[in-house]
Amino acid sequence: VQFEKVTTVSGVALQGDGNSATNYIKKFSLNYSMTESGDFADGQIFDGAVYNNDVAYRWILYPINALRIRIFPLALGPSNHACLRIELFGCLNNALEEIGMESQIILDSQISLSANSNGGISQARMYYGSGDFYSNHDNELYMQIDMKHVMSISGVSIKGSDRAMNRNVVESYLVFLGTKDNLDKELVGVSCLYFK
């Protein structure tokens, strides 16, 4: 499926052959590309339908931005015929929907901190640890989050230290945004936003 423009996809519904109870896809891979002719990035593997007329709804853990979607059947129903009808789902624009730092949907392995920072990765999460993120040697501290897939980011919330007698807060900060494919090849130049 090729969209007219890059579109956010959050899920897919699929259904087998309406005339044969044994023609359906039992497992599939949903891959995507952000270009008209580029390679497809590896997507997620999903269980498919369990009956031909059964509609199976599968939701993507991290919604993806894509120009093209490709579905690869990995396991077929009893008749070994690939029959597939699909519907794709997008995302409603909810600017206040959290992506997953506090809930830990974003894993520790997706978070990295500058080399000279004190405090572990838990300090990066809202309401976890003390929030102390500092260095006596580095004035250019950073926190980096790998979103795994290209995502639309509408905003950021920050919080200072939880310690009662500590008034350590960040008064201004920069947010750098960039996109990369699965090979860490930069696709789009980095943009920078400044907040105070």
Image (spheres, rainbow, N blue to C red):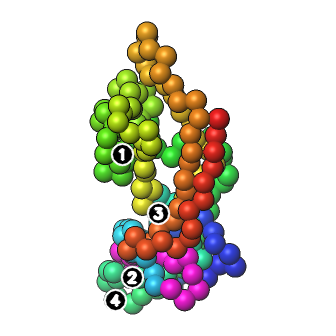
Asked if the residues shown at circle 1 and circle 2 are in contact, with their CB atoms under 8 angstroms apart, the answer is no
The residue range painted magenta reads 25-38
Asked if the residues shown at circle 4 and circle 1 are in contact, with their CB atoms under 8 angstroms apart, the answer is no
Q: Which mark is residue 73?
A: 2
Q: Residue at x 68, y 75 (%)?
A: 5
Count how many numbered circles sit on residues in the image.
Answer: 4
Magenta segment main secondary structure = strand
Q: Is 34 covered by the magenta stretch?
A: yes
State the CA–CA distance, disc 1 to disc 2: 42 Å
Q: 159 left or right of 50?
A: right
**Mark 4 = which residue?**
80
Q: How many residues crowd mark 3 within 10 Å: few (<14), some (14–19), many (20+)?
A: some
Choose top left, top right, bottom left or bottom right for residue 82. bottom left
Q: Quadrant of the N terminus?
A: bottom right
Q: Measuring from the top left, give residue 68's x and y in whole percent.
A: 56, 79
Dot 2 or dot 4, earlier in sequence = 2
**Mark 1 = which residue?**
114
Dot 2 or dot 3, earlier in sequence = 2
